[in-house]
Every structure is written in structure tokens, then in C-alpha cells.
Amino acid sequence: MRSIKKLFGILAILLCCTACEENFSVDLSDRQFIRLNKQAVSITVGEKYTIKAIPDTLGSASKTLTWSILNPEVASVAAGEDQTAVITGLSEGSTVIQVESTDGSVKYFSDLTVGKDRVFKILAIGNSFSEDAIENYLHDFVVATGQKVLIGNMYIGGQSLEGHWLNASENRDAYQLRRIAVDGSRGSINNQTLQEAIASENWDYISFQEVSQRSGIIDGYQEYLPQLVDYARALTTNPEVKFILHQTWAYAQDSNHEGFSNYDRDQTKMYEAIVDAAWQAKDLAGMDMVIPSGTAIQNARTSYLGDKFTRDGYHLSLGAGRLTAAATWFEAIFGNVLGNSFVPDNLSEYDVMLVKNAAATAVATPTAVTELTEFLYPEPNYFELNSPIYIDFGTVETGAPFNNFRHPDDLKLSELKDAEGANSGFAIEVSEPFSGMLDRGLQNALGMPTTASQDMFFSDGIHIPQSGFIVSNLNTSKKYTFVFYGAIGDNDTETRYTVTGKNEGTGLLDNDNNLAKLVVIRDIEPADDATISIKMSAGPNNSQWARFFGVNAMLILPEGMDVPFAKNAFELQHPVYVDFGTLQASAPFNFFDSPWGAPVFDLKDEQGTNTGFSMTVTDRFNDQNHSGAPTNTLGLPGEVSRDAFWGDRGNPTSGFTVYNLNTDATYQFVFYASRWGVGDNRETQYVVKGATEGSALLNASDNDSELAIVGGIKPAADGTIDIVVSAGPNNDNGDRFYYINSMMITPDGYSVPGM
């Protein structure tokens, strides 16, 4: 560089001297000047670079030029046509490129740096399908071989060849250039033109692809691909650049993409059309190679994984789908993907070998499907599950023993660990999409950390009627029990869970402010491919405005194991008193002031003993009032008889759930309700449901002395009892008002003193 600066200094002095002549006139007719289009060139050993000399148009542009390298051990130079030369890196070092005329009248220099390690540079001009193919695992495959790669993706979602050509011909800055650097770091530059991107690096490979719905139709290739290749060829600096056509994949058989109708919604027809169009296009545009990602995906679909290579019916699944495309690119460009050591964390070695075989056979036989006969069944997993597997769904992580599935868009969660920390080899992945994540900070009464109950995967059942998981790599000789917990801080939500292997089970769960209810589906045998599917949807009783459903946590248990949440063995001997409303009664009453939720944990009995019982509203009341009896003959404090929760005909039922009861005990429920100063019948019905069920009626109008009693109630198997409050059959109020001021939980048959 110092020698170049001296040369420019001498040239500047000469020009100044010329300007100092008395007549201040300059004769340019004999001026001869030449420069290079790059003042500095950086390449690596083995890399070639085209540099161009640009003569002054006022001088002689027809001079014969000679090229040389100051240190010929670092690089070689070979003259080309149209005053160009090709530089080839030979060894690490820095030197100078020189160009001069044979008569010595003009001369110019550029600095040259040659790096030690060859860096392969790949640029895709595409859309989300190029994102699927090269932005995730291709860099890892290359690094695993000890080689270096720079990857660029000129990204516009859903862009067609026609769109790329319009952007090129009008030099539109419409792209986001996404780069994966040699060290694996990622970055992006917005508002890029194709001209800028192609000229920015000495690309070894430049690829094009048609938009997916038109990838099996030849018209776009015929009209736009040759123009795009010519455009890129004129801009590239690599004389050995290879132009790639990326052959994309057919949609999933059940894809809802509107473009699937171009192929009569037939996957095989779409695949064959894509292959036919791609190979015609290769010849008509003079492409150097086709990367048959679509054939690799079709090959992989013949394996035990089947048609599970997309995440939404057309974009590739984040695990095996994207890995298959990346493996195909690696095989086509670098070769020997079967010998590549890269195995991502989210897939088993067996499935990675499946993917590599799909890619290798696709490159070897790109226009026909190769059946992967060695992968018709999954690799056997002989792991015997003896401890529960806990899974927490949501971004708020829960510590061991939970496995954390953070987001529905995450990769497959593999190598699930049981409660003892043993690696089961089981995996879980989203098979049907969810709407996203909910975090409502909800607590639970199961003994799980709050981090497990506060957030969930959920779906808006109106727009996504069904979501699901696949649990894979199970031991096909065993049966499993699935336990689901879901809690949504809303009203009238219910989730249906259906678990299917060789047999099927289903269950319904009321998610409303759920503290501890579970769905338990037992003895499910995996299918032959070692998978069990889990489908979720809004249950038949779900009338929430968006039909929300979902899951917060899941357990996988071995056959016959009891649900591993501690049961309450507390033997109730004294009443538990509950006061509803905002006027707080003193002990022994447990205070419950929210008609919409706000759980109360660890209810205390009359003696102040902690029962372990919990309670929350699971069917919202309208509100609370202070319109009850100012006094009463039952010995209840005025704060109890004066305020109440209430509902009406617009909200025909309300209620709550009591959790963590002793399943070996039988309970009695005593209800008091009062609405003072009214003359109509405001009869209220109380239905109490557990393993057994009972009901009672009470007219709340001007009531200061009557109770409703429901006895003989055993809790459900999960230790819960539901109380449903509604207008009774004799209620003749026009608005069907109903009430609850207080409730007592007692041992069955207990006689409450003074009542």
C-alpha cells in the first residue's frame, strides 16, 4: 500500500506543475491513464477472483496490458478477455497486483491479501423456502468437516422468479440480506438490492428458486430464470461461480395452502411436476446444478416418519424437515454427507442418519423417489420407564425434574428425562400448531411449582380448532399413562384431550381457574412407529368467547403407576367456615371476597387447624352485594349474613371447586343465602358433585334462619368437589336472582351447634 501511495503522490505533483503553466490550458489529448476496479482484493487459498482494468477514455484504450503479482508465491494471475485478469490465491500472505501497458506508459496497482483457509461462499436468492434450506443446519454440516463457509440469503417471503427479475431490472432495494458468517454469527441488512448483494462477495454458488406454488409450472422458469442468471453472471467476480437451481418440495398431503390446487391437491402429482419443471429449467437457463431438496423430502417421507416433514403443510418442520434440506445442499456441493459427523441436539442419531440417506440418495437419483427401506421402522428403544416424566409448557422454566418445552415454535424436545434424571430417549414435538403462549400467573394446589401452572400452550379454538403433539421413540413393548393439567384464568373453558397409539383414550378438563383437576388417560400402547399422538381441542362444554383450550403441564407414567401428586389424608373433625363477600368476618371464617376467582389455599377449620383444602371460583358469579339480612337467628356474624355473591338469568350457573379433599372421607355441605327486603321467591339451588352427588334448595328472600344441607358427598378421584349454584325451580323472580352468603364443610352427619 505504501508503494501505491508514493505513486499517487508523484502523479499529483505532475498535475500541479501542469496547472501552473502561464496560459492555464491543459491538453488532454495525449493523457493516458488506467486504474483497477478494486483497490484492494481479499481472497483465500484456492479462490479465484476476476479483476478488471479500466483505461481512461481520453487516452488510448487499446493498449496491450500485462499483469503481474509482486510476490508470485502468494498468488498467480492470468490475463483474460476485455482487459480482465483472474487472480488465484496460492498461499497465505499479502502482496500487490500490478497492471501496465507493454510500452510502460501506464501502470496501476491493487493490494492483495490471501487468507490461509478456503472460505466457500453461498448466496441464495429466494424466500422462506431458502430460509428453511440453508439458514439453519448447512453451516453446521460444513463446520463439522473442518471447512469454512459464508452463507447469504436474499430474503423476501413468498417471492417468485418474476418478482426477483422485476427487482433486478429496476434495482429495487427490496431484500433483507441474511448472513451467517464464517464463525457462525448471524446478521442481516435491510433494503438491499440484488446488485449490491451479488457484488459484495466473491460468491462460489448463487442459487435461484421459484415460489413454491409455481415450482412445478415451467412458465416462470422459461421467462425469468435465463435473464436472472445473465444478470448475476455480469456482476459476479468469481470466474468459476456455479449457478444453482433449488428444487423445492411438494406440500404435505393435508396441506391447506391455496396453491396446492395447482396440482389437484395431490402430493405425488406436485412432486413430479416440480421435478419435471426443474430439470427442464436447468437446461434452458444453463444452470450448473440442481439441488434436489424436494426429492430428498419425498425420499424421507417413505420412512417411518411419513408425512411429518412440514410444520404447517408447506414450510419444513424445524427439526427433520430443515435438516433434510440442509443435508441435500451439503451433499450436492461438498459431498459425503453420510460421513458427516454433525448431529443436532434435537434429533436422534438414527433419525439424522435417516435424513442423510434421504439427501444422499436424492443427489444420486434426483428425478425419482428412493424408498428408505432401512428406515421403515424407528430404531427400537428398550428404555423401561419406572419414574414419571414431567413436561412444563411455556417460556417460564421449571426446574428439575421438569423438562421444559418453551414455545410451540421450538424444535422437537428430545431425550426427555424422568424424575430420577434418566434419559428415556423419548421425544415430543408439535404436530399441529398452537396459537401461542398464555402467561396468567396462575397458582396450583398440586404441589407443582407455580412456574408450571402460570403459563401454557394455548389455541384459539375458533381459528385453530385442533392442536397436537407427537410423542416418539417410545418403547413399543410398554403401555403408558398420560396426565394433563391445564389452567386458564377465564370462564367456560374446557379442553378435550385425545391420546392415540394402537388404542385410544380421551378426557375432558374444565380449565377455569383450575387449581388441581387433571385428566388421566391410562394404558396407551404406542403405534408400530413408536409414537403416540396427542390431540387437543375445545371440549363440548367450552362456550368461552374464543373457545380457548390448551395445556400447562403433562406427565408420562409407566402402566399402572398412580398419579404422583400427594393425596390429602387430613381427617376433618370440625367445620370449615367460608364467608363470601367483601365484608370480612373474623375467625373461624375463611374469607372469600372475589366472585371471579382469587383462590384461597389451606382453608382452616373451626379450631384454626390447616386442612390442606383449597378453593376457587371456577364458574364466575355476576358480582357481590351487601343486601342480606342485617342479623340472623343462626349465630352467624352480621358480616356473613349481610353480603353475598349473586347471579341471574344472564349467568344461569355459577360455582366453585374445593380441592385436595381426603378421597377416603365423606363430607357434608351447609349453605346460607339471604336477600333482605324482597317479597318474591328467590330460591337458590346448590348442587354438590364429587364421586357422589346431591342437591338442596333454599329461598334467600328475607332469610335469617334457614339453611340448605347436602350430605353424603365423596370427593372425585382427584380429591375435588364441585359446587354449582343456580336459581331453583320455584324461583319466580323475573331476573332469576340466586345467592350464596356462606358455606360450611363438615364431616358427614355433623350437627352444627346453634344451627
Image: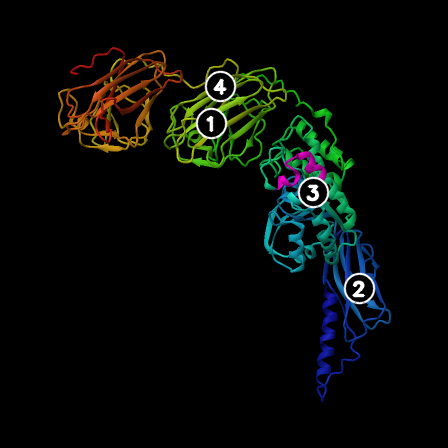
> Of callouts 2 and 1, which one flags the residue occurring earlier in the amino acid sequence?
2
- Tell me the crowding category of disc 3: few under 14, some 14 to 19, or many 20 or more residues within 10 angstroms, Cα based: many
Tell me the SS state at disc 4: strand
- Number of numbered markers: 4
Q: Which residue is mark 2?
A: 98
Question: Which mark is in front, 4 or 2?
Answer: 4
* Residue 178 horizontal/vertical position (percent): 62, 49
Tell me the SS state at disc 3: loop
Magenta residues, as a range? 259-273
Marks 1 and 3, how far apart in space? 43 Å
Of residues 427 and 16, the one nearer the viewer is: 427
Position of residue 468 relative to residue 690, above or below, is: below
Question: Which mark is in front, 4 or 3?
Answer: 3
The residue under the point 15% across, 25% down is 702
Tell me the SS state at disc 2: strand
Which image quarter holds the N terminus?
Answer: bottom right
Marks 2 and 1, how far apart in space? 69 Å
> Of callouts 3 and 2, which one flags the residue occurring earlier in the amino acid sequence?
2
* Residue 556 horizontal/vertical position (percent): 51, 21
Q: Which residue is mark 1?
A: 553
> Of callouts 4 and 3, which one flags the residue occurring earlier in the amino acid sequence?
3
Q: Which residue is mark 4?
A: 521
Of residues 373 and 324, the one nearer the viewer is: 373
Marks 1 and 4, how far apart in space? 14 Å
Q: Which residue is mark 3?
A: 216
* Residue 113 horizontal/vertical position (percent): 74, 56
